[in-house]
Image: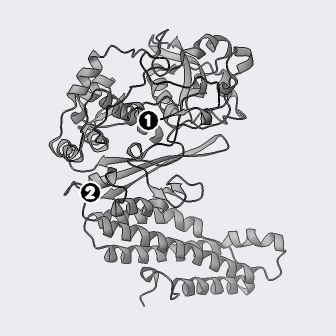
Amino acid sequence: MPALTTHGEPVELNAVEVLRQADHIAAVYGRTPGETVAVTEWFLGLTYAADVYPETATEWRTWVENRKPLAEAADWLQDHDGCWDLFDPVAPLGQNPALHPHLNQYGVGPAQLVMEQAGDYNQFFSREHLHSPTILPAAEAWRAMLTQHAYAIGMKAKIKTKDMGLPAPFANLSSARLVSRLRVIARPAWEGATFGDLLRLNLTPSGQEPGHLNLTWKQPAGPVRRDFTRRGAEQTRTPSGPADLHTALGRSIALRPAALPDGTAGVDRVLIGPGETLGDLPAVFLQDAVTVDKGLLRPSLTRDLWRQSHSLYAAVAERDKGTDLYGRIAMLHGRRIHLVAVGLLATQGKLVSWVADEYPYVPGRETELRHAAEQGSAICEHAAKGLYAAAATAQTYAYPNPKPADKPNQIARFNGATEMWGAAADLFHTLMDDVADDTPAVEALAAFGTELRTVAVASLDARLASLPTAGNGLEAQARARARLTEYLNQPKAPVHLKDPS
């Protein structure tokens, strides 16, 4: 497992070592934000399965503040008699043995296991990975498998069910449990914080049994999984506890072992089919979820993640769901915590990109932080509308007699909103850091508004620079600049965006 020690040295550790040295490791990480979340989920599941977790919010606070050691979880893991072998012939770790008989004939390249390389799940537009002979190291395959279980996209499988003698639903890949929302991890941001602190922060206090740890599809005494007689949506289950939740097997996966040139273990063929489908989860299993008007907060194809952060800060400030992650971290006075939001952008079976961002939080600053996030977003939205209005004005004077079909592209030529949004991201994060560092929100917003106004003007000027400096071009420039100034100074404009002169 890739880990970063508190001395800044990257090292490879196994799961037992990670838990035993959790308070000497700054962080564990994957290749992508989603992989990092999936690995973190796995360690949370192990900790619950080892019966090392607080039962009440008060006990949770004591664990966090006194840094309850996690060595007991390491001892349990080292002594546990379950199968931890990725290539066990009967109970391979994380896999469904039902697919193993078909690997040699129907398996595809191991890149299919890596979500970012798999291409279009439905059409397989790029087929190169299906036949690639490149062997994937076993450790990388394991982490990629965890990511599939947590984030896999619902579409069609590369499985010929009729030829394989498998039930027809094996061709239908339902979405894994984290696809439909943002996963928020509380990251300790105080001096000397470690991976152990992160695990303790994100352990949900529970008085119930931890439930099953999912090691393989057909483990003895495990949960009743899908038998694939029906589609996933018609055959769901509720996790038996937090260990079961964090290690749910969202895919049926089979891996064929192969040796790398140096003799170490790797994977050369894979098959991926549908996994178990979880039903609507109770609130206790959605401790980090942020509720918005249309359900749970999720990544958007049209809005950058930071532009949705006001919803996250609203959850921190309101804490109206009872005891949840946001209610608990509010008890940690004097501790700075960053809320790391990770999501998957996907459309029509294609992974577009991982999105991840983090936002500072300090208990006691909830109202100020929420106000800054909401007003900062409103300032940006108004500036973007002003830039569109200025672009429309420039189009009117630069193209006096346009064809109707050409008008949208002509306006887009002069619209500097894209550049403004790009620059606003860093300004917004500076705004939130300043407020978290005790700068009054009103003062921080004033600085933010002034800088954003400068950015908006510069963005428009850059778009107008291609116009002639005479005739229609000169008038278009003057009229567009005047329109932007007018818009930014409207009575309804955010006060921090207006020109104080």
Residue 243 position in % (x across, y down): 37, 31
Where 123 falls versus 167 (above or below)?
below
Where 451 falls versus 242 (above or below)?
below
* Residue farthest toward the left in the current orientation of the protein: 66
Residue 255 position in % (x across, y down): 54, 18
What separation in Å lies between label 1 and label 2 (alpha carbons)?
Answer: 25 Å
Q: What element carries label 1?
A: helix
- Determine which residue is flagged by label 2: 330
For the residue marked with disc 2, what is the amino acid?
Ala
Cβ–Cβ under 8 Å for marks 1 and 2? no
Look at the image and name its color scheme.
one colour
Of residues 222 and 11, the one drawn nearer to the viewer in this rendering: 222
The circle on residue 388 is none
How many marks the image carries: the answer is 2
* Residue farthest toward the bottom in the current orientation of the protein: 501
- Callout in the foreground (1, 2): 2
Left or right, residue 184 beside residue 396? left
Where 176 falls versus 130 (above or below)?
below
Q: Look at 29% across and 21% down and name the residue there.
A: 77
- Determine which residue is flagged by label 1: 38
Q: In which quarter of the image is the C terminus?
A: bottom left
Of residues 119 and 208, the one drawn nearer to the viewer in this rendering: 208
Q: Is mark 2 on a helix, strand or loop?
A: loop
Where 495 falls versus 105 (above or below)?
below
* Mark 1 or 2, nearer chain start: 1
For the residue marked with disc 1, what is the amino acid?
Ala
